Amino acid sequence: MKQIVLNSAFSETGARALTVSDLSLGIAKYGGYDKKEQNFAQLDRYVASGGNFIDTALVYGRWIDETQTSYSERVYGMWLEMGDNRAKTVTATKGAHPLPYTSAMRVNPESIAGDVAESLVNLKTEQIDLYFLHRDDESVAVEIIMDELNRQAARGALNLLGASNWSAARIYRANDYCVKHHMRGFDVSQICFNLMRPTPKMLGDETLVSMTGEEERIYLDMNMPIMAFTSQAGGFVSKFFDVPDAQIVSRYASPENLRRLERIRTLCRDTGLSPTEVTLGYLYGQTLTVIPVTSVSNDRQLDDVIASSDAVLTSEQIAWIDGI
């Protein structure tokens, strides 16, 4: 895996640069404590292979039972205390997500402050390396939101800041406010981005934001790196090469994506690249700096994505998949 330095455009505020692997391990599926040894082993395997960038969220694991326990953060926090794991890794987590089974938005100062405090306890740390707001609420002014994030950063709880599922235009407005007031702004965005073309409706969540041409234009203008979730399109490409998964098909099998799939099949055949190499190589070959976030269920899948992390498609190959 290659290394990427995430610098702050707001360095005068004291934000610390982060050196991260260009493949992030997403641990949304980490569950109850009965699975923690399996989770620990996967984290060990990822780090031993050169990875250091872990992506979690306060809400991950809260859907397991009615206790509203953030299993992902808590299990990961236990692992961080083992040996020198904390020194070897960079942690990204997220807050201000609607609580499970509710649709009430929580992007407000009180919820942000409460979620930051809870994540610090779960992760057993005094500062979160990279903190994302998990959702946006456009009814709340960016000034109110950024003021609260900066209060948390000023007390030492947060280092770099990120926006997850925010439109690029809204990030731009937030950062414009921060520049004018010498405050810390967003340095990284998490967005739904892969070589297929899902929509929030297809993914079953209208609050998700997917990459588009207009989004990309604004990100390039801001020179902002992207963490791409659903980076492998839920396994659509690899699973469609074998036996299609019904849920994945329902989310991605649009006429446009099926046309893309045929081009990917041809590219794999002509180049000898695996479906995973094409899937990740599409993101690594973008003009934008893109860090795929990948979640895996077993060692075979983890080894596959790690082995594919050096693949980079050419601009011509990407344009051909896109049908340009």
Image: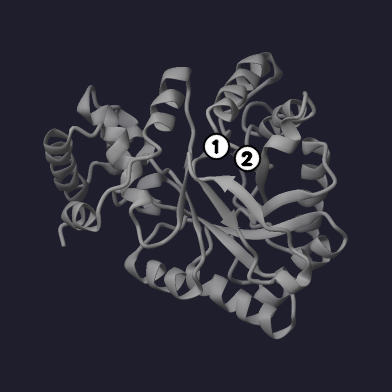
Is 29 above or below relative to 186?
A: above
Left/right of residue 43 with respect to residue 194 in the rendered view = right
Q: What separation in Å lies between label 2 and label 1 (alpha carbons)?
A: 6 Å
> Which residue is painted at 29% across and 52% down in the image?
197
Q: Is residue 321 visible?
A: yes
Q: Earlier in the sequence, mark 2 or mark 1?
A: 1
Measuring from the top left, give residue 39's x and y in whole percent.
Answer: 62, 21
> Which residue is painted at 41% across and 43% down in the image?
231
Displayed quadrant of residue 78: top right
Q: For the residue labelled by badge 1, is the local secondary structure a helix, a strand or a loop? A: strand
- Identify the disc placed on residue 236: none
Q: Is residue 68 visible?
A: no
Q: Amino acid at mark 2?
A: Thr
Is 248 above or below relative to 322?
A: above
Is 194 above or below relative to 246?
A: below
Q: Which residue is mark 2?
A: 56
Measuring from the top left, give residue 73's x and y in whole percent.
Answer: 70, 35
Displayed quadrant of residue 72: top right
Q: Nearer the viewer, residue 234 or 141?
A: 234
> Which residue is painted at 40% across and 53% down in the image?
200
Left/right of residue 183 with respect to residue 46 in the rendered view = right
Q: Amino acid at mark 1?
A: Gly
Is 116 above or below relative to 7?
A: above
Q: Which residue is mark 1?
A: 26
Quarter of the image that includes the C terminus: bottom left
Q: Are marks 2 and 1 in contact (CB under 8 Å)?
A: yes
Classify 10 Å Cα crowding around label 2: few (below 14), some (14-19), many (20 and above): many
Displayed quadrant of residue 106: bottom right
Measuring from the top left, give residue 51's x and y in whole percent.
Answer: 56, 35
> Which residue is painted at 59% across and 46% down in the image?
20
Residue at the extreme bottom: 180
